[in-house]
Amino acid sequence: MSIKHCEQHKECERQRLYRRCCAVIFAIILLLLLIVLIVWLVLRPTKPHFYLNDLTVVCLNVTTGGAANSYYYSNLAVTMQATLAARNSNERVGIYFDRADVYAEYKGLRITVPTSLPPVYQGHPDLTVWSPFLSGNNVQLPPNLAVSITQDETAGYLLVTVRVDGWIRFKAGAFITSSYHLRVRCPALLVVNDGRGSYGSNSGGGAGYFRFQRAAACVVDI
């Protein structure tokens, strides 16, 4: 057998071995993905359920600000405490709440700075309750929102939205998923002065001036 023929034979063997190794690796990866898919379909983890149980307004004041970008704006100072509950309704799947920030909005405008919730692991079917304080100081209100919040308060009803933005992971046995973006929206209807309103004054009233109407389920997206 010539030297050239031997070298060609060895090259063919290396290529054949390389193809076999690639086929084995591909089969192992495919098998692992199939196992993960089967486990996921069997367990079918569902997103956590959130509830806004209470929203206490410590103060909410609108004051005249100054001029910016050719229009006059108002300043909002607000402090409130939200009571949020999250329940893991999965029977065999746990949930890692790795990070979550809570803040309040009024008609799409963020009126408080984000407050971080402590990381927590929820087993099944655990319930976790948080009561973070939400505050904003010198929040600039555009003219339309300044008028709107005054009108709502005068009418006796004020609707704000408490939002949660964070990241979660699911755990089934030893298997832990990658992170999912958690977005929660909780509408909160506040009754002003027992529904009588402020009659044009939006000074914040005092204790019991703003009253949370009722507990409500939140909209959860992941």
Image (cartoon, helix red, strand yellow):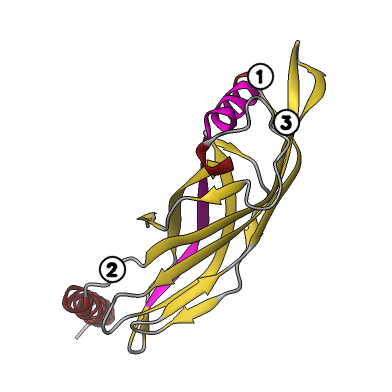
Give the percent coordinates (x, y) of residue 63.
78, 29
Question: x, y (%) of residue 86?
Answer: 43, 69
Q: Is residue 60 above or below residue 75?
A: below
Which of marks 2 and 3 precedes in the sequence? 2
Residue bearing mark 1: 143
Image vertical order of residue 179 relative to residue 80, above or below = below
Classify 35 as above or below 82: below
The boundaries of the magenta stretch are 145-170
- Contact? badges 1 and 3 (CB < 8 Å): no
Tell me if I can see residue 9 in this picture. no
Side (left or right) of 2 relative to 102:
left
Q: Which residue is mark 2?
A: 46
Dot 2: what SS?
loop
In this view, the residue farthest toward the top is 70
Question: What residue is pinned by disc 3?
Answer: 140
Amino acid type of the residue tagged 3 in the rendering: Gln
User: Marks 3 and 2: CB-CB under 8 Å?
Assistant: no
* Mark closer to the observer (3, 2): 3
Residue 73 image point, x, y percent:
74, 21
Q: Considering depth in this image, is 81 or 73 the residue closer to the camera?
A: 81
| Residue type at tag 1 | Pro
Instruction: Kindly identify the residue that appears in the image at 27 percent across and 80 percent down.
Output: 14
